[in-house]
Image: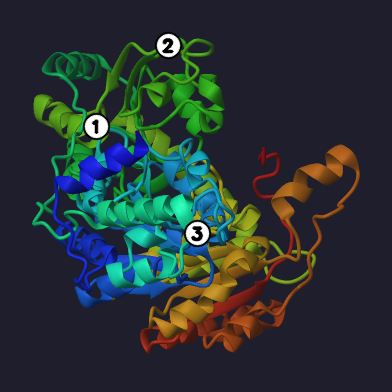
Amino acid sequence: TVVASYNCSHSCHSTDTQSTRHGGESVAEVLRAHGIKYVFTLVGGHISPILVACEKVGIRVVDTRHEATAVFAADAVARLSGSVGVAAVTAGPGLTNAVTAVKNAQMAESPLLLIGGAAGTILQGRGALQDIDHMSLFKPLCKFCASIRTIREIVPTVRNALAIAQSGTPGPVFIEFPLDTLYPFHLVSKEFIPKSPPKGLMGNLIAWYMKNHMLNLYAGAWEPRDVSPLPVHIPLATDDQVQKCIELVSRAKKPVILLGSQAVLAPTPAEEIRKALEGLGIPCFLGGMSRGILGKDSPIQIRQNRRDALKEADLVLLAGTVCDFRLGYGRVLSRHSKIIAVNRDKSQLLKNSDLFWKPTIAVQGDVGSLLVQLSKGLKGYHCPQEWPQSLKAQDATKEAANRAKAEEKTEQHLNPLKVLYRVDELMAEDAVIVVDGGDFVGSAAYILRPRGPLHWLDPGAFGTLGVGGGFALGAKLCRPDSEVWIIYGDGSSGYSIAEFDTFTRHKTPIIAVVGNDAGWTQISREQVPMLGSNVACGLAFTDYHTVADGYGGKGYLMGREDEEKMSDIIRKAQKETREGKATLLNVLIGKTNFREGSVSV
């Protein structure tokens, strides 16, 4: 049966055994037609033809020091550009190293294409180098998985994968490319067809099988094919659902909007969404990628006391926000509130609604377009001013308390809150903020103010450490003229500080701030009082600035003795970055009781 299917397949197409073309060219052709500007990678022989072909057609190939970083960088490009991010890694350990980053992209709903190398089709399962079952690893993580079996499949498979990544709830897709689908015919035949096959009937059968396998592999490989993008399906609210939402909002006296990352997904421009929100005038709490959508100082953005506001609200619009651990699994919502839930993903839309909350109306659809439709349908409506004003007044009280806490002396080193307030004051108006850490980043989320839409990058619901280097790399490529900041915890910096080599080689100067308190403080904050031990939570006041120097960047050390010069040192780092050098501020910080009681699990 196998032989017959091979024979039939290649008999329908011609096979050009003299061509020097290879499958990598087909991949590059489709990526270019889809407007892909970057492919992130850690090189391996299994995928070399794809990388070389991409470079030839003008796609920039950016190599990193870890496969996870390559995927994180592709994730950042997807979020900031509204297109698909692309990473290519080699077989076996190259792909296993990418698993965490792909899972993060799945949970963050980032459209991402992971390209993986693999052993040749004829050698899979026979002990070839780095030959493992990749598909079983990625099927639970990806919306679509495929293993290329013939070169003629490459174009339609890549086109399909790119469309699926962006459709519905965006997410990662994976395509495995066996070695013999990427290299030219003459090289593959030389490698796989034995020069001296065994004698006799078995030898003849092997030679015949191998010849047919090769002919089928390359049959129709270079026939003209459509490489243009396929349609992308975006779920939208129905007119009836929109009308019901309009009626609920119009009757509300104390409405609140909770925006999640889905609010800034393509295709609705973030600027349109901002105008819609400002037109409604409803107080907004921003989370994930939606941070910054209202600018730095909006009268309708509320940053503090969310739990209290939700108790008082008579209507809550969950605009891409999920009732998971971040909302107490829905327990923070009042049973007296009308609740409009909007999400592209049905499982996220109704998460925990069987336990702690019930939506008045649940809309499986795009958040951004619904917000714009709401604003248009509520022309003339404006939220009663005393409601956002009262919440804003509470904000101001809490902000004043935080600023006062920032002026307190810590037992040693610098007050982390004071450092963060100073960074916020000096940060450029076009700055993109990447956060990667626990305790220091948790404090930064209260203090740093993203300057505009898509100016904030965090890992998302998976809470992954190690995103910093990759996210910053992708962000700097998308926004080459903007300041890109990584806010690192000292623990998390260890995952991607080696990417200072990448920043140097690829001329992508960023600024990193390491909040160095010599420990995994988010964990020890609970572990010590609950269990009476700091085991495994202690680090050292490591010279991270020296590490940055060694990788071609510029490092600065800041301690208590530099408190009066803090602004000067930060400005110097900004100047170095503008002049093309990646910089790192190793800031020695002490302990505070800010965010005491926050949970890490």
Q: CA distance from mark 1 to mark 2?
A: 20 Å
**Of circles 3 and 1, which is in front?**
3
Q: CA distance from mark 3 to mark 2?
A: 46 Å
Image x and y of residue 420, in percent: 54, 64
| Residue occupied by mark 3 | 91
Q: Which mark is residue 108?
A: none
- Left or right placement of residue 87 versus residue 219 in this view: right
Residue 32 against residue 428 in the figure, above or below: above
Q: Sequence-wise, which precedes: disc 3 or disc 2?
A: 3
Q: Could you tell me which secondary element the residue under label 2 belongs to?
A: loop
**Of circles 1 and 2, which is in front?**
1
**Mark 1 belongs to which amino acid?**
Asp
| Residue occupied by mark 2 | 358
**Mark 3 belongs to which amino acid?**
Ala
Image x and y of residue 452, in percent: 30, 56
Image x and y of residue 454, in percent: 31, 54
405 or 85: nearer the eye? Answer: 85
168 or 115: nearer the eye? Answer: 115
Residue 358 against residue 119 in the figure, above or below: above
| Residue occupied by mark 1 | 366
Taking the spot 16% from the left edge, 34% from the top edge, the residue there is 372
Q: Local crowd at mark 1 within 10 Å, few (<14), some, or many (≥20)?
A: many
Question: Is the C-beta separation of discs 1 and 2 under 8 Å?
Answer: no
Residue 179 against residue 275 in the figure, above or below: below
Q: Sequence-wise, which precedes: disc 3 or disc 1?
A: 3
Q: Quadrant of the C terminus?
A: top right
Question: Is the C-beta separation of discs 3 and 1 under 8 Å?
Answer: no
